[in-house]
Amino acid sequence: MTEQVLYIILLGPPASGKGTQAAQLREFLELPHVASGDLFRENLKNETELGLQAKEYMDRGELVPDDVTIAMVMDRLSRPDCAGGALLDGFPRTIAQARALDAALAAAGHRVALVPCIQVPDDVLVERVSGRRLCPVCGESYHVRFNPPEEPGICDNDGAELYQREDDQPETVRRRLQVYHEQTSPLIDYYRNRGLLIDIQGDQSIEAVQSDLRSAVSKIGLFRK
Ligand code: ADP
Ligand code: ADP
């Protein structure tokens, strides 16, 4: 599967399950998981210039400006582990980002293969965000009710203490959802018009969503270059 270059974009609102699904799908696809939010949080943790620049936007639930975001993700995609493509999560989030990605891939003779869009109603998203807990070491995403770790507050993978994201507070989440509807949801038509979008019903169990995603990506095997 991985001799061919494959770019898949997981689209969906905040807390729709992109990270949860990507963690399982990357093994199935043998592709690196490139999550722009994780890259920003890594920069924040390491107190880099980029992290400091991004922080004010993240704290408000706004998007980090396109030029900064595009440069960060392109740098990540240029690393050797992405030679066979990537499973993108949280990028692109604006039409300008999508165009920049298309142009960069085209320049290298590649293109986006598929864009599964995980659809979940806003009220369910709010509930998911409020119970989300993350591992600071491996990035695994848990939920206190829907996807709890074996031992409360502790990561199953590495025993680290789970934390709650600062921007998962109710006011910030409302703004993030608004930003999604205004700036990111136009990408649904952008990719649908290119024949790349697959709607995935996200308001079902984690296993059922994973199974739908795997069926969708298995089908495109036929069309890969
Ligand atoms: P979620 O998984 O809840 O959708 P992310 O972890 O993807 O959230 O993103 C957290 C924050 O990082 C966003 O609210 C935004 O401030 C910033 N961010 C992440 N990806 C992008 C992007 N592609 N463009 C601009 N800002 C981004
Ligand atoms: P995203 O990366 O899209 O922001 P996450 O994968 O972090 O979303 O999921 C958000 C929260 O919802 C997490 O607490 C996660 O455990 C939980 N979650 C993910 N998928 C489901 C699902 N299908 N049903 C219930 N809860 C889910």
Image (cartoon, grey):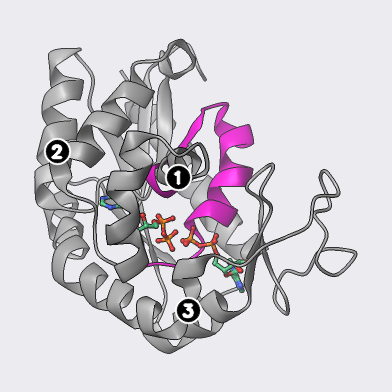
Q: Which residue is mark 2?
A: 67
Quadrant where the C terminus sits is: top left
Tag 1 or tag 2, which sits nearer the N-term?
1
Ligand 2, by image quadrant, is: bottom right
Answer whether residue 196 is magenta in the image: no
* Above or below for 163 versus 130: above
Distance, label 3 to label 1, CA atoms, is: 18 Å
Q: Position of residue 219 (x, y in %)?
A: 43, 40
Circles 2 and 1, Cβ within 8 Å, touching? The answer is no
Determine the residue positioned at 90% across, 65% down: 151
Q: Point out the stretch of residues depicted in magenta.
A: 11-37
Distance, label 2 to label 3, CA atoms, is: 27 Å
Q: Secondary structure at mark 2?
A: helix
Q: Which residue is mark 3?
A: 169
Say which amino acid is labelled 1.
Leu
Using the rendered image of the protein, determine whether residue 202 is visible from the camera's viewpoint.
no
* Above or below for 225 versus 53: above
Residue 36, which numbered label?
A: none
Q: Which residue is mark 1?
A: 44
| Local crowd size for mark 2, using a 10 Å CA cut-off: few (<14), some (14–19), many (≥20) | few
| Local crowd size for mark 1, using a 10 Å CA cut-off: few (<14), some (14–19), many (≥20) | some
Say which amino acid is labelled 2.
Asp
* Above or below for 135 versus 204: above
Tag 3 or tag 2, which sits nearer the N-term?
2
Answer whether residue 15 is magenta in the image: yes
* Above or below for 150 versus 27: below
Determine the residue positioned at 50% across, 17% down: 2
Q: Position of residue 76 (x, y in %)?
A: 37, 25
Q: Secondary structure at mark 1?
A: helix
Q: Position of residue 185 (x, y in %)?
A: 20, 65
* The image quarter in which residue 173 lies: bottom left
Distance, label 2 to label 1, CA atoms, is: 18 Å
